[in-house]
Image (cartoon, rainbow, N blue to C red):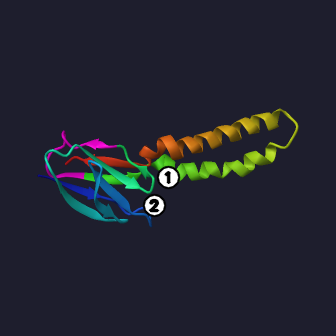
């Protein structure tokens, strides 16, 4: 059995949401904001990931990890702090769409690109919402 300590630091971004810890497709524990949990996994376990609603982290390989490793779970900085600011641009871009000029065409293109990027993030980029960082001592 390998022992893994999973740590979730205090954060404001997903403060009230719980992170589910998944080993080989099975939920093994849940971490609240600021929690730390020690789990034991079989030597045959292959992958570990974290899940938040429909979003998750990339899977990390447990086969190559040593015993008594610490893993820190953090939100992806861009997706969780800068993406909400980008969505604030939508009303500003929409204001300029109704003018009859080159600026209207440019703003329509920017708005469409922004909406497509947000949709891509929430569908195909959902596996990068959280980040798992093994802590080496």
Residues packed near mark 1 inside 10 Å, few (<14), some (14 to 19) or many (20 plus): some
Q: Per the image, is 40 magenta? A: no
Q: Which of 59 and 84 is in front in this view?
A: 59
Q: Position of residue 78 (x, y in %)?
A: 50, 46
Q: Which mark is residue 80?
A: 1
Asked where in the image residue 107 lies, by quadrant, the reply is top right
Compared with 84, 61 (above or below) is above
Q: Residues in magenta?
A: 59-70
Where's residue 17, x and y in %?
A: 43, 64
**Residue closest to the eye, 120 or 27:** 27
The percent position of residue 27, horizontal first and vertical second, equals 29, 57
Q: What element carries label 1?
A: helix
Residue depicted at x 47% and y 59%: 13
Considering only order in the chain, which callout, 1 or 2, is on the residue closer to the N terminus? 2
Nearest the eye: 45 or 91: 45
- Considering only vertical position in the picture, is 33 above or below 119? below
Q: In this view, does 117 lie to the left or right of 66?
A: right
The answer to whether mark 2 and mark 1 are in CB contact below 8 A is: yes
Q: Which residue is drawn at 32% across and 63% down?
A: 30
The residue that disc 2 covers is 14
Q: Where is residue 25 in the image (x, y as percent from the top left)?
A: 30, 49
């Amino acid at each position: 059995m390998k022992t893994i300590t999973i740590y979730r630091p205090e954060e404001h971004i997903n403060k009230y949401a719980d992170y589910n810890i998944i080993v080989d497709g099975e939920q093994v524990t849940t971490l609240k904001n600021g929690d730390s949990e020690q789990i034991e996994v079989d030597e045959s376990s292959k992958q570990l990931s974290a899940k938040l609603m429909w979003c998750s982290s990339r899977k990390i390989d447990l086969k190559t990890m040593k015993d008594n490793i610490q893993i820190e779970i953090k939100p992806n900085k861009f997706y969780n702090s800068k993406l909400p600011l980008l969505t604030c641009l939508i009303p500003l871009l929409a204001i300029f769409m109704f003018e009859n000029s080159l600026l209207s065409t440019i703003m329509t293109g920017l708005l469409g690109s922004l909406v497509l990027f947000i949709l891509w993030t929430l569908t195909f980029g959902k596996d990068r919402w959280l980040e798992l960082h093994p802590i080496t001592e």
